[in-house]
Amino acid sequence: MGDHGAARTEHINVSEHNKTDETKREHGRPDDDSWLQPERLMEVQCANLKKEIEDKEVSIHFLKKQVERTDRSRYDICEVFSPPRVCVVAIDHGLRGGWSLDVSTRDPITGRCYDLRNPKDQKEVKKMLRRDCPTVVVVSPPCTAFSIANQGEVDPQTLAGAVEMVRLAMEVCELQHRAGRQFIFETTSVLEGLEP
């Protein structure tokens, strides 16, 4: 009976020793017992604490960047291919309404009209988007050339101009999306020639 007890004790001690080795490896401790020494224990704890602080700093940095991106917005809402409509209502509701760019209307913020078929004005719009970082842009490209209400033939030059404005509208939406901001693409539901 004494032999069985000795074997059992040795088995338990080996098993406990293996568990201790696994625990040491999991926590980056050396195989010997040097990690039990106060200096080594303090070193391991400091390394773990540094790692935890670095992880939190990365998270805090990420959150600060998100806040900065939001705070950079000079305006809550702006309009492209539109006289001042949504921006006026936004201001009435306490939001920061920005510019409204259209060929037929002088924008109250910039003081000028924009012909968005003109490459120079297109470039200016993109520059304004990057500079002002509006939270939301309402994009309303003219749809007359695509409307089923337009029963007549559309001359190629008019059609090319309309396609160019839709292309610019999509580019504006893409700039907003890439910057993590929002857009509204406004158009009628009675269009032909534009495939989803």
Image (cartoon, helix red, strand yellow):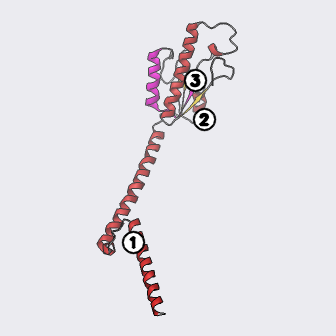
For disc 3, the neighbor class at 10 Å (few under 14, some 14 to 19, many from 20) is many
Residue at the spot x=64%, y=17% of the render? 193
Residue 105 visible in the current orientation: no
Nearer to the camera, 156 or 20: 20
Nearer to the camera, 32 or 51: 32
- Identify the mark nearer the N-term, 1 or 2: 1
Horizontal and vertical percent for residue 186? 62, 25
Horizontal and vertical percent for residue 135? 52, 35
Say which amino acid is labelled 2.
Answer: His
Q: Which residue is mark 1?
A: 21
Residue 18 sits above or below residue 80 on the image: below
Q: Which residues are magenta?
A: 118-138
Residue at the spot x=31%, y=67% of the render? 43
Q: SS at mark 3?
A: loop
Horizontal and vertical percent for residue 59? 44, 51
Residue at the spot x=57%, y=36% of the render? 94
Q: Which residue is mark 3?
A: 84
Distance between the alpha carbons at the discs numbered 3 and 1: 72 Å
Distance between the alpha carbons at the discs numbered 2 and 3: 15 Å
Horizontal and vertical percent for residue 101? 53, 21
Say which amino acid is labelled 1.
Answer: Asp
Q: Which residue is mark 2?
A: 93
Of all residues shown, which one is farthest toward the left? 39
Q: SS at mark 2?
A: loop
Nearer to the camera, 60 or 33: 33
Residue 45 sits above or below residue 183 on the image: below
